[in-house]
Structure formats: C-alpha cells, structure tokens
Image: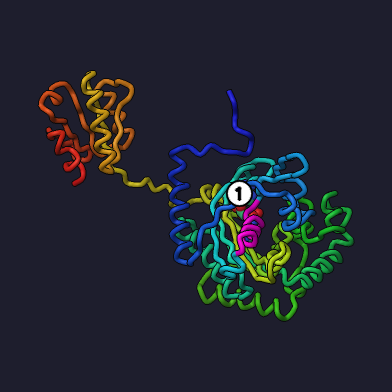
Amino acid sequence: MFKRIPGTKDILPEEVICWQTVETIARRIFSFYNYQEIRTPVIEDVSLFNRTLGTTTEIVQKQMFLIHNQEDTYALRPEGTASIVRGYLENNLDKTCSFAKLYYIGPMFRLERPQKGRLRQFHHIGVEAIGSPEARLDIEVIALADQLLKNFGISGYRLKINSLGCPQDKQSLSGILKNSFQEKLTQLCSDCQLRAKNNVLRILDCKNEDCQKIVRTLNLGQNHLCPDCLKHFEEVATGLNSLGIPFQIDPLLVRGLDYYNRTVFEITHNALGSQDAIGAGGRYNNLVSQLGGPDLGAIGFAFGVERLLLVPNNLKQTPAKRLVYLINLGEAAKSAGIKILNQLRCAGIPADMDYLNKSLKAAMRAANDNGAAFVLILGEDELKNNTISLKDMSTGTQKEVKIENLTEELKC
Ligand code: HAM
C-alpha cells in the first residue's frame, strides 16, 4: 500500500471542518480590513527565492523542493511573499492600483525534518500590504494578525516585535554581532562559523542548542537604529499600545529571511513546544525594487494553519446542516427514491440515502451517524399510496406526507 510522503498530511473530512472555519473567519476579517485575495502558482522559478529570501538562508540552502526541467529549475514555493511581489509587478498592479492589500491561503513546501508542527507541505494564511512605508500600516497589519487570532478563539499567545532598521542599520547590527561572536566563534556550530562570515544575522535563528545558548547571552538593544528607523519603531510601539495590543520587544528577533527590514514580528504559543511560532511577518521595503519595481514600502505576515489548529482554539464548529436521509425498503422504492432525492436536491435541500441495502434498523443508525435532521422511509405500502414516512429526528415524531408535498413540507 502507498504511504504519504513524510511531512505531508491527509486532512480528513472531520478535520476539514476546522480548516473551513479558519478560512471563513479569515476571509471575513480580511474583508473588514479591505484586503483582497490573490492566488499565485505553487511553482516558481527557483531564482525568485534565491534572490529574495537570500542565498545564505536555511530555506534556500537546505529546504527547497526543486524540479529540474531541461535548463530551468523550478521550486515549489517555500513561502508566499516573494511570489506575491512577483505577481504584483508582473501584472502591473504597481501601475494600476499602486497600494495593494492582498491576502492568500494555500500550501507551502519546505524540505524540513518533520516533527510536531513542522511539515514539508504546510499551509499559510497571510497578507501582503504593498505600497506604503508608513508605521500606521505596520500597526494595522499587526492588529489584523491579533484580531484573526481572537476570532479563531486562540488566547495565551505572545507577540514579539523588533526593528532591523534600514539596510545601513542592518549593516551596523551585523557589525555589532560580528564583534560579539568574535571570541566565541569556535563554540558555534560549523554552519554558524560560516554564517559569522557570510550572514551573521542568521546565527540568531540557528536551531542548534549550543548556538542558542550563546545567542541568549547577547545584550542587544536598538543601538543599531538610525533616527528615522528608531522613530518608525517607536511609532509602531505607541500605536500597538494605543490599540491595547500587548507585545514584547525582542532585540534577538531577526527572522530567517533576508528581505526584511525595519519592523519584524513573531507570534508564539506555549502549547506548541519547540516549534512555537504560529505566525510571523515584517516589513520588506526593498523587495519590490529588488524585483525590478518602484521603491515601495511593504509589510505582511503569515500564519501556519496546521499550527493554529494545534493550539487550543474554538474552530471545531460543526456547521448546522438539515440533512434529509432516505431509506428505501424494496426494489420499487429504490428507483422511486432516486427521483425523490433528485427533487429534494434540486429544491436546495441537502439529501442522501442508504446505498448499502441496510435493514431498517441499521439504516436508521446510519442516518443518525450522518447527523440527519429528518429520515424518510419509503416502502411498498407508501409507494402504493403515493406517500412517504417523514420522521423528525429531533422530536422523534413521524407522519405520512404526500410525495408531491414533500419538498414544501421539508422547506418549512
Ligand atoms: P515564516 O516565519 O517562514 O514566514 O512562516 C510563517 C509561519 O508559517 C510560521 O510562523 C509557522 O507558523 C508556519 N511554518 C513555517 N514553516 C513551517 C513548517 N515547516 N511546518 C508548519 N508550519 C510552518 C514566512 O514565510 C513569511 N513569508 C511571512 C511574511 C509574510 N512576511 C512578510 N509577509
């Protein structure tokens, strides 16, 4: 028997209900904030990610699913931001609407070592607001993430924020870090020893426990920020305070992707264990111009749907359905039953029937298991009289109804 590829999941009907609830809530909240949906392909030219996420990042170095096709190499998208900025520019949205508020829901792929909350195919619900450098937009985007979580019934999460500053500030931060790691180089893992040379910021999100111990001893502040970036960061913090959104400033938060600058944030939850981020995001003011577009500010975030479903939430809301379940007794009733079912469905009434020739008792049990609100029983006698038995499962009452009046009866 074939098995799933490790790190992928089958989402069975019982769980799909939660997925649909997440998506329905998210779409509703996105519309409150005037975001519109965008859908981009799951495969892209690999160089899109190499260029934007950074060649020294974990994702680009180790986690891309690659497809080689003659001279071209495609990648299954590991994240949504780069694709969406590509789509924004390729479809001239910078010219037609300049400021775009976009959201997306879909699968992402990373060749990781699977564990709880870490998959090779996982799903993002995210937003990208492209076109403004204003701190007000950072506040709105973080408030949107917070409102989504509240509407998913998730509490007890922690919002951490930081500012990487502009590219010059990131250089200063790199300098500070290089000095700090200088004497501890040999205690770092071999990857981080290379990172110290090539991209020292990436040491901060190394998962190696020894490296993390050293990282935790660092005493960083906001000293790397220029006056403009510091003002931006203070505006964001003041705005979040004014909205009553609790947060912590974490100078060690740099995020594992190179495109970020200025505000970065991460939302964690203790219920998740080691993979504790339910979502994360930040500003990427240079990404649009890096991909050949104008100089535009942009910010976004993404939640990992699987992780949202792992923390306590109230997403398991079974939608109320008024299913009608038909039980046919005898051959003649079976062909008449097909017509009745068709008539109900065409009238917009959810209906199903027993296809396994079960006994009346077993078929009643199946109706119950399917959550039927009404059961119809059609036997020889009923057929002769052109009637059908209608049982209301909530009250247990049963009555005979003329078949021609059935649709009207069930619509009430
Ligand atoms: P990210 O932090 O790489 O950011 O992913 C966002 C979220 O996706 C994580 O916080 C986590 O919940 C979930 N996630 C990531 N990897 C996995 C995995 N292997 N298995 C399960 N869940 C996972 C980004 O991807 C950025 N594009 C977010 C962003 C949007 N920044 C600006 N705009």
**Percent position of residue 46, x then y:** 73, 49
**Percent position of residue 25, x then y:** 44, 56
**Main SS type for the magenta part?**
helix
Report the span colored magenta. 79-92
Compare residues 150 and 1 and report the one nearer the observer.
1
The residue labelled by disc 1 is 41
Instruction: From the viewer's perspective, tell me whether residue 352 is left or right of residue 243.
Output: left
Instruction: From the viewer's perspective, tell me whether residue 206 is left or right of residue 364.
Output: right
For image coordinates 16% across by 31% down, the residue present is 389
- Kindly tell me whether residue 322 is visible in this rendering: yes
Compare residues 155 and 319 and report the one nearer the observer.
319
- Residue farthest to the left, as pictured: 385
User: Ligand 1 near label 1 (Cβ, under 8 Å)?
Assistant: no
For image coordinates 52% across by 77% down, the residue present is 242
Q: Amino acid at mark 1?
A: Pro
Up-down: is 213 above or below 376?
A: below
